[in-house]
Image (cartoon, rainbow, N blue to C red):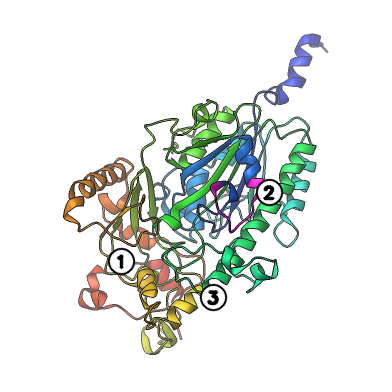
Amino acid sequence: MKRLPPVLILVIVAAPHAFAADRPNIFIAISDDVSFPHASAHGSKMVNTPAFDRVAADGVLFNNAFCPAPGCSPSRAAFLTGRHIWMIEEAGTHASYFQAKYKTFPEALQASGYFVGATGKAWAPGNFRHNGREHNPAGKLYGAKKSGYVGGFEKFMSERPQDQPFCFWFGSSDAHRSYKKGSGLAKGKTLDQAEVPAFLPDHPEIRSDLLDYAFEVERFDDDCDQMLKILEAAGELDNTLVIITSDNGMPFPRAKANCYEYGIHMPLAVCWRDRVPGGRKLNDLVGFVDLTATIYEAAGVDVPDDFPVVGKSLVADLTSNKSGMADPTRDAVYVGRERHSSSRFNSLGYPQRAIRTQDYLYIYNFKAERWPAGTPHKFGRAVYSAEGSLLSSQTGAEHGGYHDIDACPSLTFLIENRNHADFGAYLGWSVDKRPAEELFDIKVDAACLNNLADDPKMVAVKQELNQRLMKELTKTNDARVLVGGDVWETYPRISSLRWFAAPEWAKQNPAAVPQQEWLDVLRPKK
């Protein structure tokens, strides 16, 4: 047998790990339902987040980072693919499918030689196996909350081949509800530490609920701290691109599941100690699709050709010495929302698109006739024929259908005090129907309570933002502006369903009700 020359043998053996020295590890920590500015590095006094603060000190703190959608499943799908939610079909709504044709960055990195894994909440809720995926789009899962997120990361690191770069996704379920009521106070926090946004009443019940949320934020940060120490002990931290953020806003009325500031503005800290100068703050407007592009460039992996990333890489900004505005062209981000929970007749969604600039937030509500937080009444008990026709029903409790707001003491307080002289307006701000257009001056109204869309002085601003938003939606083939949005209602919901009476608009014009074959299969038969 002819022997290969020694030098050729060396090349064959070394080739699988030749990239390890110049390709960084990727470590992503993403909390569940945390709003800006709830990290101590961002100035919050309600929480103490030393791990987040450490990453910010070692790298860059982003003051204007925005998620792609104010709900977990579509937000994570957009991050993983680098595409707006309206560009990924079922994955762009809540609890549906994630087609395998939309390759994620963990899948692309794995194909290029990275060791890939995840722990906790990766992409969820939804079904990613219906058309061929073997593992979660964020990677093979290692451990979960019950067995310990940190233990899952330790297992992943123990199985990682020596000198092979890795990509790891840590998805916490903190600060998702439900909470142990009083956990914040039990930890030693005091009511005066709570930071009450203007869209919630300043009351001890609300303050205590906010402290329980703060306790969950800190628990996520503690897990991050332990994982960072594992990386450092392994000698891997310097060559790891670390990203810590959240998927959508805090689980309170008028925050999560809304395109308002507290639903879409996220904490974000990024470090890469080998390449990124630390101690800087950037005010550039950054979306998660930009983080996706950044990961591709940092890893030296080509973006998918068939469904490319729409974001712009941050590598040049990260590796510069700039603070403040590193790239003036980053002057807008785009956000969207479709269905969140099952909260309306036929589980219809509440479609929104939004553009956020340095000064303004403009929101377009495509179905303003629908209830934004859910129809106030749902069926308490319904009886159907064998064919699926509704025979009789009992209306549920008054104000019992706001399922786009997570059940919580704050929502209960708003409902119970809806007629209170001081607190009565707060429920309406969260659940009442809204106009098609909303415009807010973020510099003075971060709570998004003063809609300027009908202000004669703001006509030019509103028109400009509407045109910019519609131009982006048209360029990126959003069905809501190109072919009508009913396609979104055809995407099945994998999670539980609730049943509501037909609204007046549906009774008066049955042809306007989207055709949903998936719903006919799941509708109760008796």
Amino acid at circle 3: Glu
In percent of width and height, residue 413 lies at: 48, 78
Q: Which numbered tag is attached to residue 224?
A: 2
The N terminus sits in image quarter? top right
Can residue 450 be seen by looking at this rendering? yes
Amino acid at circle 2: Cys
Amino acid at circle 1: Pro
User: Quadrant location of residue 149?
Assistant: bottom right
In percent of width and height, residue 453 lies at: 23, 57
Query: Circle 2: is it few (<14), some (14-19), or many (20+) Cα within 10 Å?
Result: many
Q: Are marks 2 and 3 in contact (CB under 8 Å)?
A: no
Query: Circle 1: is it few (<14), some (14-19), or many (20+) Cα within 10 Å?
Result: some
Give the vertical position of 221 relative to 275 (above or below). Answer: below
Which tag, 2 or 1, sits closer to the chain's start?
Answer: 2
According to the picture, the residue beneath numbered tag 1 turns out to be: 514
Which mark is in front, 2 or 3? 3
Can residue 400 be seen by looking at this rendering? no
Which mark is in front, 1 or 3? 3
Which tag, 1 or 3, sits closer to the chain's start?
Answer: 3
User: Quadrant location of residue 23?
Assistant: top right
In the image, 109: left or right of 483? right
- Count of number-bearing discs: 3
Q: Nearer the viewer, residue 80 or 332?
A: 332
Q: CA distance from mark 2 to mark 1?
A: 44 Å
Which mark is in front, 2 or 1? 2
Which tag, 2 or 3, sits closer to the chain's start?
Answer: 3
Secondary structure of residue under mark 2: helix
The residue range painted magenta reads: 42-52
According to the picture, the residue beneath numbered tag 3 turns out to be: 205
